[in-house]
Image (cartoon, rainbow, N blue to C red):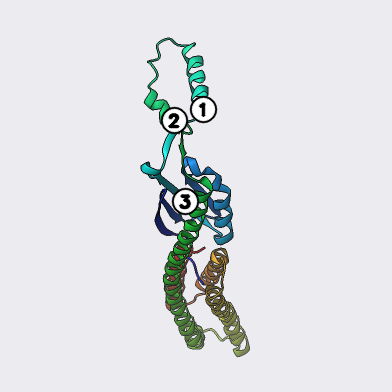
Amino acid sequence: MTQSMTAFARKEASYPWGNLSWELRAVNHRFLEPQLKIHDALRDIEPLVRDKLRSTLSRGKIECTLRFHAEALNSQIEIDASRVASIIKALEQIRSHSSDLAAVDPIAILQYPGVQKSSGIDTDEVLSAASELLNQTLAQFIEARQREGAELAKLIMQRLDAIDVIVAEVRERMPQILAAQRDNLRQRVEQLGVDLDPERLEQEVLLLAHKADVAEELDRLETHTNEVRRALKQTGPIGRRLDFLMQELNREANTLGSKSIVTSTTACSVELKVLIEQMREQIQNIE
């Protein structure tokens, strides 16, 4: 199923010991780039979070935030004495280089990361709950990606159908275009009053037809659109494959334009490139 790289999900849960909330945001990126913002007391969960992200997602810049609020009634704030001592020692070393420093604000030290620690809460229980809540948030996040991916697939399919219509029109008109060019060539020879050998004239007509022959390009365009449809039905990451197919489609559309001998075919080539560019922009969001 087609998945978008952009999505948002948030889950919050309350427990006797406090509240937990996960928030996942994602935008386009060539690779998977997790950016974790984890509450200081729960830093031990970071390796688990990274493993889960790598096992469920392939691409995107993922901002993953875990918030934790302990219940005041069930937890007492304690101070990490060794942490405070190391901070004070560092401040004394700084003061030795400058006597102009203002007095140390105890509140500022209290707010320094790692100074406060909660007692009365089973950290393992909190981590276990955070892991389970992360699973739920990831499930919601993937559902959001799939919903947006399905909409992107619809938009791409619409443009594939439009490309097929253009290809069919050009294919249907090519015999008439070549016949008209053959007649124009003969009329010009007659107007010039040149006595041209019929066999030589036929050779020139065949050469013109060969230069203007776009059957191969039309066949490749159909092949590539069918391959895009097949890719959209696959599971797993398909964004890079689709991006490659857009390059191939654009190559054939350019060749079609360069071989054009009438303005209608040139216009079709331009319209094809517009549709391909629209698809390419959508594909930038697909995982």
**To which residue does mark 2 refer?**
112
The residue under label 1 is which amino acid type?
Arg
**To which residue does mark 3 refer?**
64
- Depth check: give the residue in front, 22 or 213: 22
Residues packed near mark 3 inside 10 Å, few (<14), some (14 to 19) or many (20 plus) = many
| Of the two numbered discs 2 and 3 in the rendering, the one whose residue sits closer to the viewer | 2
Between the C-alphas of marks 1 and 2, the distance is 9 Å
The residue under label 3 is which amino acid type?
Cys
Q: Find out whether the residues at labels 2 and 3 contact each other: C-beta distance under 8 Å.
A: no
Q: Earlier in the sequence, mark 3 or mark 1?
A: 3
Locate residue 40, reporting x and y percent: 48, 40
Residue at the farthest bottom position? 198
Residue 51: quarter of image: bottom right
Total numbered labels? 3
Locate residue 174, reporting x and y percent: 50, 85
Locate residue 220, reporting x and y percent: 58, 77
Q: Residue at x 45, y 49 (%)?
A: 65
Question: Mark on residue 172?
Answer: none
Between the C-alphas of marks 3 and 1, the distance is 28 Å
